[in-house]
Image: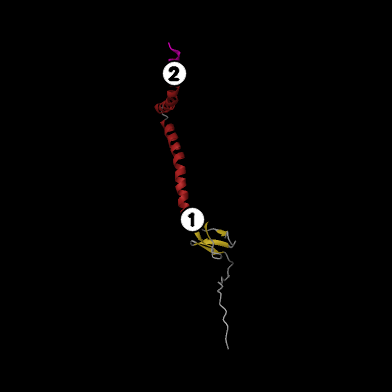
Amino acid sequence: MNQDNFKHFQSGFAEVSRWLLPFAVIWLLGAIGLGWLVKSFLILVGLIIITPVIAFFGFRWWLKRNLIQSDCPVCHHEFISLNQTEFACPSCSEPLRVENGQFNRLTPPGTIDVSAVEVPAQTLDD
């Protein structure tokens, strides 16, 4: 008998057995009444694959609803923040709060905001 043919047959059988063994184990478990174990394993694998996809799209939906882009009411620097949070403006360090989709200053009660208007000087001629 040719020794090379026998070695080739052994390596081919090793390749086939690598794929046959899992199928044989699954068939054996199903045959002895442990099909629920196989189904549970397949469901677990399915959840491991599907859960990150659902989490990714859920996180994107949450960000669309909770990210607010607006201008600082003090220095008019435009930036993004999360809805219903308190923070400081990155440009002027003014404490701000997000309310109704806009940035508002955090001021103590009773504080009145005043906007200064430049008035041009006029000379009076007598």
Estimate the x, y position of residue 85 in percent, counting from the top left.
54, 58
Decide: is 53 above or below 26: below
What color scheme is it? Answer: secondary structure
Give the residue at x 45% y 36%: 45
Q: Residues within 10 Å of mark 1 (few under 14, many from 20)?
A: few
Residue pushed farthest front? 125
State the quadrant of the C terminus: bottom right
Residue receiving disc 2: 8
Residue pushed farthest top? 1
Estimate the x, y position of residue 43 in percent, counting from the top left.
43, 37
**Magenta span contains residue 2:** yes
Q: In the drawing, what numbered circle is on residue 66?
A: 1
Displayed quadrant of residue 90: bottom right
126 or 56: nearer the viewer: 126
The segment highlighted magenta reads 1-5
10 or 95: nearer the viewer: 10
Secondary structure, mark 2, is: helix
State the quadrant of the N terminus: top left
**Magenta span contains residue 35:** no
Left or right relative to 3: residue 106: right
Secondary structure, mark 1, is: helix
Q: CA distance from mark 1 to mark 2?
A: 63 Å
